Image: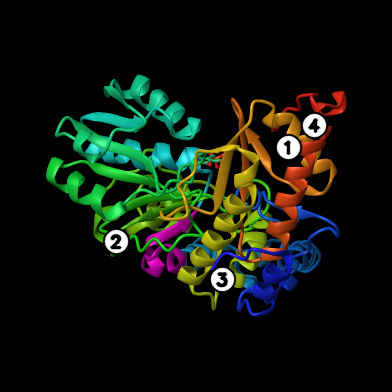
Amino acid sequence: MTPVSREEASALDHKDPLAHYKTQFDLPDGVIYLDGNSLGPPPKAALARLQSVGETEWRGGLITSWNDAGWIDLPKACGAKIARLIGASEDEVIVADSVSVNIFKLAAALCAKAPGAIAYHTDEFPTDGYILQGLSSLTGAPLIRLAADAGHGALHSDISVLVKSVVHYKTAAVADIAAWETAAAEANVAIVWDLSHATGVLDMGMHAAGARYGVGCGYKYLNGGPGAPAFIYGERQAATTLNQPLSGWMGHAAPFDFAPDYAPAAGVERFACGTPPILSLSALDAALDIFADLDIAAVEAKAKMLGDLFLARIAPLGLESISPPPSERRGGHVSVRFEHGYEVVQALIAHGVIGDFRQPDLMRFGFSPLFLGYGDVWDAASMLASILETEEWRAAKYSARRKVT
Ligand SMILES: Cc1ncc(COP(=O)(O)O)c(C=O)c1O
């Protein structure tokens, strides 16, 4: 039941089985952080790990730490932890590079195996389309831009690869993975799922839904830190049939044989490329431990309730929500339209309520359930109401556009 008073919201926090996870994060006092869907806050364990990697492993162990501290195995170790969250087997996920680079590797490998067009929806996160545009000009593969609302009926046998988000970065609409995969199997299309806005907040069950390929980032709900490395999911059998184009030594079956010719490692491990970024990987590895005992379905359920509460609280403000309503499944965030959304978000930030803005007029608020409570969401909505009512956002200082919105 959605709380209808601040007291009810606090009461829900008191009996929330996930409430204690907040103590594992190092958040500044007085901040309500509604942007964990863009950059997760630092887990205390990740900060401590960065310190010890620097002091003990790098400074103390020097190069011996590649073996002694297990650095060389971190991409696989982190992959195994992420696999559990997305519903894959431990050896089907590897951490490497960025989402953009991983889309390139997977889409190029799939296209080389089964030549045809590469497709994406025009309203996808831009980098997904940019990468496919680059791949198309490199290989000559036709590019198909599907309308934002094109359903799986749009899949046809001329398409080799479709890149598609599970949770849309603006609306938070959730794709029906199983339905898309069924249609894709009939049309012989391979889908590369972008799991960036879904991993760590949505119960996806990639295997169970028949999904074979995916990419996602480490810096949003996984709280791995700014620019944390991304991951690739490749179903075991399927990944073994792919030749990835960035055939670097870390994806070689035996990198330290220093053999003259490339031979791919088994399964998804072949999608590694160069030397892994150990500082970032270590932070991600520690951050992932927070999820060790978590039931991801419970995480999704709480995110949904927080988002529903926010939508209910701001309903009287008359803002148009572009996100799925409470009756539908939704990712962890909510976006609402307001012509001066940029200024309002800046005013909110000045009051310690941090969300973000997406062109042209969207205020986006994320509800990471591991460090936010119902009381926080109640207070954030009150602050939004106050800023709109007083028109505080009109102050000139809030209109200066910064590079990152
Ligand atoms: C859905 C989605 N895909 C891709 C990216 C960017 O990926 P990267 O910068 O790791 O290449 C983002 C970043 O926010 C995103 O939301």
Q: Name the residue under label 3.
A: 291
Task: Read off the magenta span.
Answer: 83-95
* Label 3, residues with CA under 10 Å away: few <14, some 14-19, many ≥20: some
Find out whether the residues at labels 3 and 1 contact each other: C-beta distance under 8 Å.
Answer: no
Secondary structure beneath dot 3 equals helix
Q: Is residue 353 left or right of residue 129?
A: right
Q: In this view, does 290 lie to the left or right of 112?
A: right
Q: Which amino acid does label 2 sit on?
A: Arg
Residue 273 numbered mark, or none: none
First in sequence, mark 4 or 1: give its number.
1
Q: Is residue 359 visible?
A: yes
The verdict on label 3 being within 8 Å of ligand 1 is no
Q: Is residue 208 above or below residue 358?
A: below
Q: Please name which of the two marks, 3 or 1, marks the residue nearer to the observer.
A: 1
Q: Name the residue under label 1.
A: 345
Secondary structure beneath dot 1 equals helix
Q: Is residue 98 left or right of residue 224?
A: left
Q: Which amino acid does label 3 sit on?
A: Phe
Residue 236 numbered mark, or none: 2
First in sequence, mark 3 or 1: give its number.
3
Task: Identify the residue at image location x=63%, y=66%.
Answer: 370
Task: Identify the residue at image location x=33%, y=27%.
Answer: 147
Q: What residue type is labelled 1?
A: Val
Q: Is residue 341 above or below residue 371?
A: above
